Amino acid sequence: MAQPTEVDPRFSFRAVPVLETADAPLVAEPAPITVEPAEPPPEALPAAPKADFPTRLFWAIVRFPEWLFGVAVLMVGLAALAAIPVLNFLSLGYLLEAGGRVARTGRLRDGLIGVRLAARLGGIVVGTWLFLLPVRFVANLAHSADIIDPGGSRAAAWRFGLFALIVVTFLHVALACANGGRLRYFFWPFNFVSVLLRLFRGGWYAEARDAVWNTVVSLRLPYYFWLGFRGFVGALAWLVIPVSMLAMGRINNPAAGLVAFLGAVLLGFVLMYLPFLQMRLAQTNRFWAVFEWLSVRREFRKAPWAHALAFIITLLFALPLYLLKIEVVPREAAWIPSLVFVVFIFPARLLTGWALGRAKRRGERSRHWFFRWTGRLVFIPAAAFYVLIVFFTQYTSWNGLWSLYEQHAFLVPVPFFGM
């Protein structure tokens, strides 16, 4: 057996220096990873050059008639809705939403909602009405020919011509609507060319279907109805008690005069808050905001003169409308006085929203006490004068005592609820 100190020749090996083993790494180091610098991002596309002032002025002049036509159509449409029971909540809802948008943004132009769409729909109505005039004229001639020569050849020829004209008119109106519905398309005789090209391209039905659906959805009728209904209920909740107390002055009782006087004072107090409370409802889309009168006081401190101007215009524009409540008009012409009501009430709603928007932009800062107190000075006499006129309207309005509840400045913009 070999001694421990002896080296077995079977396991002989070449010695490796210790220093080399210590210096040399056991595992080969990986090659250093070099990260190439990322390619610089492509330069942003240059912004489209802004049109110069003459170009913008030219297009503003060109588009102004369409905008003006849209405003006129919008007023007529709101008046027509206001003259229809239940649907008049749509009209009130639109007026509240217009003021609410102004209150949220602070810009009066934001209150004109859907003017371009109203111009498009109004163009369809006007164009269709104009092209139905020849149909009516030929129909009258055909009727006269049938009276003069019943069953004759001339009457038959007129009936055939009337039928052909109806078909042609229907196709022309349908193609004008399919091409976009602008008023100028009704006077363009080659609408069928563009419609045929779109048919050959494919997907025309889906485009037309989606366009009609998007237009209907953009009207937001359920939203306007719900907002108008809540605005109506909130205003009526504030008005019903003071107006009822004011109406009790007609009772033959010694205390009736005192109750009516207290009702007049309470009504004046309500009037100073109600326009802004209704607008807070539209601004926040919360029903209970219509009862947050302390918030209105805080908003007043931030923009007192703006609130005073909106309050005066609201009451001032509402007073002349009582002249249209003296005598009821036929139902078929009910939209005419409603148009006057909408035209007068709409600016008042916008100004009320503008006052709240102006207060919102000021943050938590209140104006100087001089502006606050001078702004308050106009509220009491304006409210007192309005209450005095309202009290005497029960003797001049068609509905008598019931007319006290028809507060068109805050409820639906119609002279009579029963319209």
Image (spheres, helix red, strand yellow):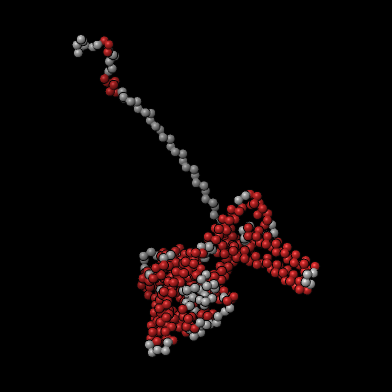
- Where is residue 126, by image quadrant? bottom right
- Where is residue 267, by image quadrant? bottom left
Circle count: 0
Q: Position of residue 4 (x, y in %)?
A: 19, 13
| Residue toward you, 309 or 8 | 8
**Would you place residue 4 above or below residue 341 in this image?**
above
Considering every residue shown, the one lying at the far right of the view is: 153
Q: Position of residue 365 (x, y in %)?
A: 36, 66
Residue at point 42%, 87% (across, down): 251
Q: Position of residue 8 (x, y in %)?
A: 24, 11
- In this picture, residue 395 sits left or right of residue 60: left
Considering every residue shown, the one lying at the far front of the view is: 151
- Where is residue 289, by image quadrant? bottom left
- In this picture, residue 255 sits left or right of residue 402: left
| Residue toward you, 299 or 341 | 341
Is any atom of residue 340 visible in this view? no
Residue at point 31%, 23% (across, down): 24
Quarter containing the N terminus: top left
Is any atom of residue 86 visible in this view? yes
Quarter containing the C terminus: bottom right
Q: Position of residue 17 (x, y in %)?
A: 27, 18
Residue at point 68%, 60% (across, down): 171
